[in-house]
Image: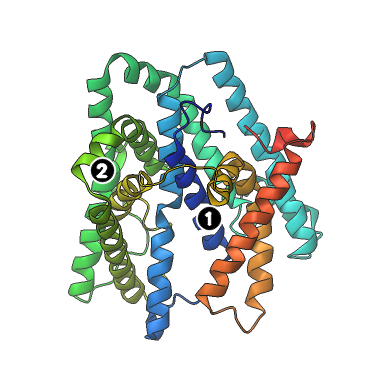
Amino acid sequence: MNTTNEKSRLHYLDLLKTIAIFCVILYHSLTVSGNVRSGSLVSYFNYFIISCLSICMPVFFAVNGGLLFNKSFHLKKHIRKMAHMIFLVIVWDMGNVLVKATFLYHTADPASILRHFWSFDAGWSNQLWFLMALFVLYFFFPILKATYDTKKHTFLIFTAASLVIVCGNNMLLICTRLVAFLFHAPVPTSDINFFNQFNPFRGIYGFSFAYFLVGALLVTHIRHLSQKLSFMLALILYLASMLCLTLYGVMCSYGQDTYFDPVWGGMETIFVLIGTLCIFRCSLAYRYSEKRICRYVRFISDHSLGIYLLQSILADFMHTALSHTPISGNILINIGAALVLLWICALLSSVASKIPVLSKIFTL
């Protein structure tokens, strides 16, 4: 997952990948309470922080789209990558389930283990959904790339239509939940496909398509975006959009009488779309130098895939260990623990990528 060669390397993408993978680890290992129904100010603050993490996967999809669409395409190499994705999912699915069954959940039931292999259950290997969603994007990519290269106007229309379908459908859901909440009616707990079978993204991660396509345009026109949107305004808009997502999540939590996850429940919202665009703009302020922090950012970026795969196992152990300590409710402790885990995963991935056999399961 290197960003490109040195001369054409887009350093702001290194920063974006580093921010995104840190947010993923923090989200997966969090032990603080975001139960806003408790009424405590700390829970509201924690919930806002969790909402801010919602841009992690949209940023990853956008970065992947920006890199893929704006470089040369080779079909055979592309097909080999798709086959390697399947290989990675199988290997890491088995690794996740066997390790967690042995050391975390202490189960030896063969039937249960086999079921977890296939179903990618939460807490087992469900975090591999990203690679499977990326595989679907890669499947359609040759057609999308040809359109991007030769029919840019058509590509732009398709991207806009994808955003309308994904975010538009979610906006209707937001309005439905808001009306139900205001009139003290039951607030829908599950997503609603308002477009029914006219929705081409039904049954798949539609938001991954939207951000993947947006990423292609963002990388091409990022300088134009920076001229229209200042750094400070982008930062303010990001915080405002995350605050709106927080308020939406609070409404759903109270209306549904359960915890509403602003990360999973937020990726299709207009709030996260705006937040992702603003994070891209803010990242342009990053300037690479030979300072240690910049070398760290590049190091994390170069090993982001390996880190993601490793944290799918280690973050659960971190969460379990941290939750049994008296400081588990401290958000600063959680952030510090996530930084430590990020660095551990990066070092392990770096070492593994230098070993001929192991490198195959840490790189794409």
Is residue 16 at all visible to an observer of this figure?
yes
**Residue at 26% over, 53% down:** 234
* Relative image position of residue 42 (x, y in whole percent): 42, 82
Q: Is residue 155 above or below residue 319?
A: above
Query: What residue is disc 2 on?
Result: 195
Q: Secondary structure at mark 1?
A: helix
Q: Counting other residues with Cα less than 10 Å from the Cα at mark 2, is it few (<14), some (14-19), or many (20 or more)?
A: few
Position of 263 compared to 28: left or right?
left
Amino acid under label 2?
A: Phe
Q: Which mark is residue 22?
A: 1
Compute the Cα span from label 1 to label 2: 35 Å
Res. 103 image quadrant: bottom right
Q: Quadrant of residue 355?
A: top right
Q: Residue at x 48, y 50 (%)?
A: 20
Label 2 SS:
loop
Q: The disc labelled 1 sits on which kind of residue?
A: Phe
- In the image, which is nearer the foreground, mark 1 or mark 2? 1
Question: Can the viewer see residue 262?
Answer: no
Position of residue 248 measured from the top left corner of the image (x, y, whole percent): 29, 66
Mark earlier in primary sequence (1, 2): 1
Image side of residue 128 versus residue 112, left or right: left
- Residue 286 coordinates in the image, percent (x, y): 41, 46
Q: Nearer the viewer, residue 136 or 213?
A: 213
Decide if residue 306 is on the left or right side of residue 59. Answer: right
Q: Nearer the viewer, residue 351 or 42?
A: 351
Image vertical order of residue 294 relative to residue 186, above or below = above
The image shows residue 33 at horizontal and vertical percentages of: 49, 77
Describe residue 261's horizontal placement relative to residue 217 as left or right: right
